[in-house]
Amino acid sequence: MTKKLLEVNDLKINFKTYAGVVQAVRGVSFELYEGETLAIVGESGSGKSVTSNAIMKLIPQPPGVYAGGQIVLEGRDLIPLSEKEMSKVRGNDIAMIFQDPMTALNPTMRVGRQITEVILKHKKISSSEAKDRALKLLELVGIPMPEKRFRQYPHEFSGGMRQRVVIAIALAADPKLLIADEPTTALDVTIQAQILELMKDIQKKSKTSIIFITHDLGVVANVADRVAVMYAGQIVEYGTVNDIFYNPKHPYTWGLLGSMPDLKNNVKEELRTIPGSPPDLIHPPQGDAFAPRNEFAMAIDYEMEPPMFQVSETHYAKTWLLHPDAPKIPIPEEIARRIEGYLKEEQDDGK
């Protein structure tokens, strides 16, 4: 059986502001296994990036507060660790790929030095050995002429090449867990596909576990093994890629799927939108946080928060629509057609 690498249990993260306490993450739980990719999906403000930064213990305190829960990496809870102890975990055990490579890189330092610094900090090797490893990493991430590129500055690289450098830095100390926070957002579609293929290739070679943070479900289909859909600081649906794409149960997941363009299958329908805005997490709403935006909301959605219902061994959803007494609401037709399109696309790609 695959070994469990990370377990997040009932994580709560608050931020103290002048307006009040923002409950940014409200009881998030999930697990990650060796060599697996978990995608965390949701619109802006859902708590995705706060969750990933919390795992790295990059939440500034104050204003941030770890208000409850555990982050257990290979049997050790990271939350009680001091900053000195966490500095040994970062890089060695967990590394992060940030969404904007230009701000992640130091513009005044040569790229080679930025990679070797990380290697020398975490590995007991000589400078020449660190340089050799840095050159191999540049080659691994698909940067041509690594000897020449090693001596260049970030501004001499394209956006896609800078993101490859950021990935090389993240891999420098052989981390067990790689957190990719919207790593393709700042890139054009062609380069996005190249970076995603690169990450999949690196994972096959290194068996690294990946948490992939994104708002784009189209990206998820190509990289993830399992998906956690986040809304208003909570996971509202959780399952394998097939569970989420072909048997979605939460109305919010329906909305995300419906907002994806289907270009390959020539679907000419208008894109479905999710009305309204995410709730104010200084005063989270009573009941189901998605109820005001949910066309299928029932009276109970405004009164009681739904539990996480189990759909199958791998699939869970936090919606009262799964209660035995709830009316049976089918997936909206246009979303069902999109799901059929995904299935057809997979079959065509498999031929």
Image (cartoon, grey):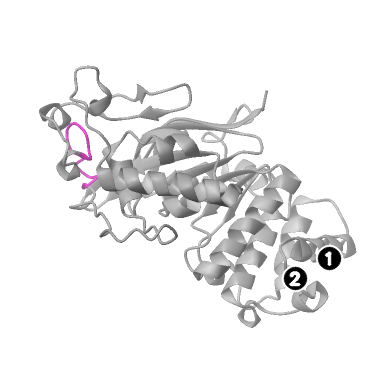
Q: Is residue 218 above or below residue 29?
A: below
| Residue 49 on image: x %, y % | 43, 50
Q: Residue at x 22, y 26 (%)?
A: 328
**Residue 27's mark?**
none
Q: Position of residue 181 (x, y in %)?
A: 50, 54
Q: Quadrant of residue 263?
A: bottom left
Residue at 27 percent of width and 30 percent of height: 319
Local packing at callout 1 (Cα closer than 10 Å; few below 14, some 14-19, many 20+) is: many
Real-space CA distance between mark 2 and mark 1, rounded to the nearest whole angstrom = 8 Å
Q: Nearer the viewer, residue 212 or 351?
A: 351
Q: Give the structural element (helix, strand or loop) at label 1.
A: helix
From the viewer's perspective, is residue 301 above or below residue 218?
above
| Amino acid type of the residue that numbered disc 1 sits on in the rendered structure | Lys
- Per the rendered image, the range of residues in magenta is 279-290
Relative vertical location of residue 163 with respect to residue 217 in this rendering, above or below: below
| Residue nearer the viewer, 205 or 176 | 205
* Pick the front one: 1 or 255: 255
Instruction: Tell me what residue is drawn at x 55 percent, y 53 percent.
Output: 180
Residue that mark 2 sits on: 112
On the rendered structure, is 310 left or right of 276?
A: right
Secondary element type, mark 2: helix
- Between 124 and 285, the one lying in front of the other is 285
Mark 2 in CB contact with mark 1 (< 8 angstroms): yes
Which SS does the magenta portion mostly show?
A: loop
| Magenta-span inclusion, residue 286 | yes
Where is mark 1, residue-wise?
Answer: 131
Q: Residue furthest bottom?
A: 156
Q: Do we see residue 53 in this rendering? A: no
Q: Amino acid at mark 2?
A: Gly
Based on the picture, tell me whether residue 315 belongs to the magenta stretch.
no
> Is residue 241 at least partly visible in the picture?
yes
Give the number of marks: 2
